[in-house]
Image (cartoon, rainbow, N blue to C red):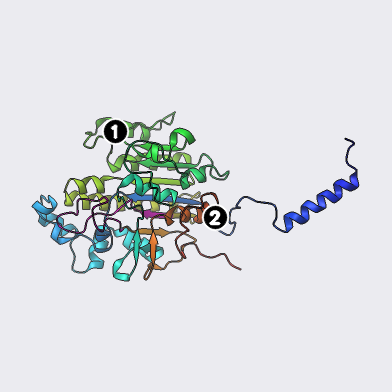
Amino acid sequence: MPPLSPRFKCRSGLVWLLIAAAGLVPRTAAADTSIKTRNVVIVTLDGFRWQEFFGGAEEGLIDPDVGGVRDRDTLRRRYVRESTEAKREALLPFIWGTVARQGQIFGDPSRQSSAVCTNGLKFSYPGYNELFCGFGDERITSNDKRDNHNLSVLEFLDGRPPFRGRVAAFCTWGVFPFIFRQGRNGLRVQAGWTPIVDEPLTDQQRSTNELIAALPRYWPDNTFDVVAWRAAREHLLRHHPRVLYISFGETDEWGHGRRYDLYLDAAHQADRMIQELWQMLAELPEYRESTALVLSTDHGRGGTRGNWTDHGQQVSGAEHIWIAVMGPDTPPLGVRGNAAVTQGQVAATIAQLLGEDFNATNPRAATPLPDVVRPAPR
């Protein structure tokens, strides 16, 4: 075939320009350049009930038989106050002193609002899949260590050029590498009792590995929150990830163990670590005034003195959760009233905070939480 003439090439190029201008050529979703947020930190408190999140310590559970509490007077002094607002701030001072004032919180039933997981099973693997993949998957029916079928928002972001290699997860529960299918995508997931591998190790990382070896294996597949916290903090300082996930698991474990005192203490310590993290982010130039914080849980628990320790398909009310967001693009609307949201909306919200469109790649995912990302100026 003879070569095309310059005139034909010119006309052909003009035709393609006109087609593209008309929007007939498919394009990949582009990042929203009006977004100020450059980084997102996600933190979850496994199985932490909305009752304590919004109401503080429940006095009926501060009991040796019902809550396994060993020192009622000390626990009351620590967390019991006259008003609901004071109780919840005593338990979670950073969340209620800072996040509620500078960000948004969903799920308070006293404000005619709800936040629910929709998977129907109300335990961890289905909950974390819904939280990070955007929908409940009927194929996930256990907590077994099997690779997820679904693309998570962490894997999605790690596949985008601005975030490639800068997404990391630090989790107390050893199932997370399978939830995020680390084996196939190489995502950085530090989980359970596995020592840190990040050669050459820093002094802090070596110290954390020594801690992992020294701590009692109280739960075979779940380590203590301080391990995930120390590993995540050092990774943040050393590698400056743009998307960081920290999963705390002690609230769920102490809940199952009917230790209401340790359940409350674990939530209080998680709040303290989140505050320390936020202060650290404010001091680092890579994160200052450009980082969003997303907080939530994988499921709720029962609401009675008898079943507060439990969750699952048969536990009424365990589908109710809570969600909080704070960052430079999130209007400070506080506790949202008259809002009904789902756990699945968190995944697309994480992407939207970074100017990315998770729904374009994963149409089954729920849409972002309403009015959490400030609309771009016209």
Q: Is residue 49 left or right of residue 74?
A: right
Residue 97, image x, y percentages? 33, 63
* Residue 317 belongs to the span the image colors magenta: yes
Q: In the image, is residue 86 above or below residue 227?
A: below
- Residue at the location (41% across, 68% down)? 333
* Residue 262 belongs to the span the image colors magenta: no
The residue singled out by tag 1 in the image is: 212
The overriding secondary structure of the stretch rendered in magenta is loop
Hey, what amino acid is under mark 2?
A: Gly
Magenta-drawn segment: 293-320
Residue 355: image tag: 2
Mark 2 and mark 1 lie on one chain; the one further toward the N terminus is 1
Q: Secondary structure at mark 2?
A: loop
Camera-side mark, 2 or 1: 2
Q: Residue furthest front?
A: 138
Quadrant of the rendering where the C terminus is positioned: bottom right
